[in-house]
Amino acid sequence: MIDWNRIDSVFLDMDGTLLDLHFDNHFWLSHVPLRYAEKHGLSHEAGRDALMPRYQGVSGTMNWYCVDYWSRELQLDIARLKEEVAHLIAVHPHVEGFLQALRHANKRVVLVTNAHHKSLALKMQRTRLASHFDAVVCAHDLGIPKEHPEFWDKLQAVEAFRPAATLLVDDSLPVLRSAQDYGIAHLLAVYRPDTRLPDKEVGEFAAIRDFRDILP
């Protein structure tokens, strides 16, 4: 699936790619609606119904990923709520072995995430994966999410890479398409970002079931 002789840099998404998206899905679709409902004297279902349009209204923007934005909008301490369910944060199978293999193969390994700094810090604390990366790039530092083509120019300014020799693994089809438009040559999707859900539609992209599929 991958000719590793042609790869210099490996860009890896975090949520849904390295980590099980079940944590995020449970958090935003169940836990936050529950706490919001409690705050406003609503049923859990009514809380969820109230939040869905608000989520959809900022989908694909920096605000969607911003802990501070949602704390202000909902008048809830989102960072603290994440800690309440942090036991659900889990690394996908064979991720650590894959990261170690990349190190042995002398590839530059970069975590490239839309996640807010507070979410990133919590997940790195829980998973202990940070030491495997040569660099960590957070879209909040660049001011634009990965879905936008301009993101890759901004990334190039802080993490020089050759698009023709770069592999991106990401569970988001809009992100993969924006990277493809930029010229990143090696792109892989993820069949099961959330291990509690069925396989995801991966569109026009090749995809992996776990990282054993592409071990160097």
Image (cartoon, grey):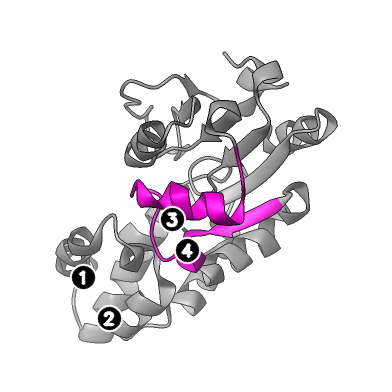
Tell me the distance, in whole angstroms, between the alpha carbons under discs 1 and 2: 14 Å
- Residue type indicated by callout 1: Gly
List the residue tagged with mark 3: 24
| Residue under the point 23% across and 63% down | 58
List the residue tagged with mark 2: 73
34 relative to 155 in the view: left or right: left
Between 73 and 83, the one nearer to me in the picture = 73
- Residue type indicated by callout 2: Glu
Q: Earlier in the sequence, mark 4 or mark 2?
A: 2
Dot 3, crowdedness within 10 Å: few (<14), some or many (≥20)? many
- Residue type indicated by callout 3: Asp
| Residue under the point 65% across and 19% down | 6
Q: Quadrant of the N terminus?
A: top right
Dot 1, crowdedness within 10 Å: few (<14), some or many (≥20)? many
Q: Nearer the viewer, mark 1 or mark 3?
A: 3
Read off the magenta span: 135-161
Tell me the distance, in whole angstroms, between the alpha carbons under discs 1 and 3: 17 Å
Q: Nearer the viewer, mark 1 or mark 4?
A: 4
Between 31 and 8, the one nearer to me in the picture = 8
Tell me the distance, in whole angstroms, between the alpha carbons under discs 2 and 3: 18 Å
List the residue tagged with mark 1: 47
